[in-house]
């Protein structure tokens, strides 16, 4: 079974070209970060990337345009999933944001700090963590849009030296709660070896912080890095 590979990129002027390079390297879907001034789930790499994006003027309208340009480059075949925080939607308007993000080319949405039992009308990918109860897992599995995002570690995003030992137990519980729902694991996955180990437990993996670091080197560097991840997943 082919494992899905999702790459996270922060919205910015270079993002459409970087997204194209990631897909050329073997990414199956892309998460596009809409920067927020208080990103509670993000570690230092993505936090700094968000600060740079905000300094460059990447507010919600500019991020929507980035999404639109990325969709135009990639066509309709690659899922694009904005990832942000509830306060941004609150400020922009919940229904307005949902409408505009879809019109710009989003396939779904991730709102990192929005509990599963709030804003049920907002279709989005749900996140679960090692601390989630079985009841919350089942609720998230019923509500999620397309796949369930397994947070492999307790804490913020960021590369780790080793794969999370908590992922196996979380994946087993999530599989029981949602046997037909694809499970993707993220947070703390950065190397091809970690990607392969995580993929043995789930249906796909998400790489964020390390991809953002590599993206600073430009499209060619990102394409090469994603190709290494893809090769590890395909072994």
Image (cartoon, rainbow, N blue to C red):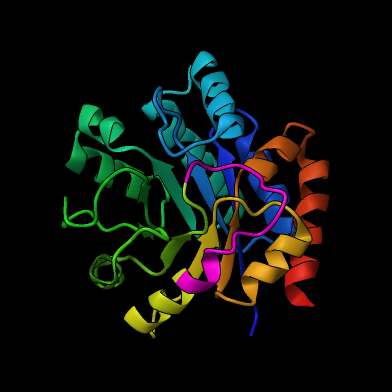
The percent coordinates of residue 148 (x first, y second) are 40, 66
- Say whether residue 194 is left or right of residue 126: right
Magenta span of residues = 155-169
Compared to residue 2, the image places residue 40 above or below, namely above
- State yes or no: residue 82 in magenta: no
Compared to residue 208, the image places residue 49 above or below, namely above
The residue under the point 40% across, 22% down is 37
Viewport quadrant of the C terminus: bottom right
- State yes or no: residue 165 in magenta: yes
For residue 86, which quarter of the picture? top left
- Say whether residue 178 is left or right of residue 4: left
| Depth order, front residue of 26/43 | 43
The percent coordinates of residue 200 (x first, y second) are 64, 77
Compared to residue 11, the image places residue 188 above or below, namely below
The percent coordinates of residue 192 (x first, y second) are 77, 60
Question: Magenta: predominant secondary structure element?
Answer: loop
The residue under the point 69% across, 63% down is 195
The residue under the point 83% across, 51% down is 224
For residue 135, which quarter of the picture? bottom left
For residue 43, which quarter of the picture? top right
């Amino acid at each position: 079974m082919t494992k899905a590979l999702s790459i996270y990129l922060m919205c910015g002027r270079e993002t459409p070209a970087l997204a194209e390079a990631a897909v050329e390297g073997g990414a199956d879907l892309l998460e596009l970060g809409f920067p927020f001034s208080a990103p509670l789930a993000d570690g230092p790499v993505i936090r700094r990337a968000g600060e740079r994006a905000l300094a460059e003027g990447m507010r919600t309208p500019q991020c929507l345009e980035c999404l639109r340009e990325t969709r135009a480059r990639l066509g309709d075949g690659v899922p694009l999933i904005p990832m942000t925080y509830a306060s941004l939607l609150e400020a922009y308007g919940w229904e307005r944001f949902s409408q505009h993000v879809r019109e710009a080319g989003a396939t779904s949405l991730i709102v990192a700090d929005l509990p599963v039992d709030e804003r049920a009308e907002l279709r989005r990918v749900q996140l679960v963590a090692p601390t989630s109860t079985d009841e919350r897992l089942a609720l998230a599995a019923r509500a999620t849009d397309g796949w369930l995002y397994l947070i492999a570690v307790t804490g913020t995003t960021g590369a780790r030296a080793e794969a999370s030992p908590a992922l196996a137990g979380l994946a087993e519980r999530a599989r029981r709660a949602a046997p037909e729902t694809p499970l993707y694991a993220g947070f703390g996955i950065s190397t091809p070896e970690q990607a392969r180990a995580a993929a043995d437990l789930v249906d796909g993996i998400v790489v964020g912080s390390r991809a953002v670091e590599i993206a600073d080197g430009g499209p060619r560097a990102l394409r090469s890095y994603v190709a290494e991840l893809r090769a590890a997943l395909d072994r």
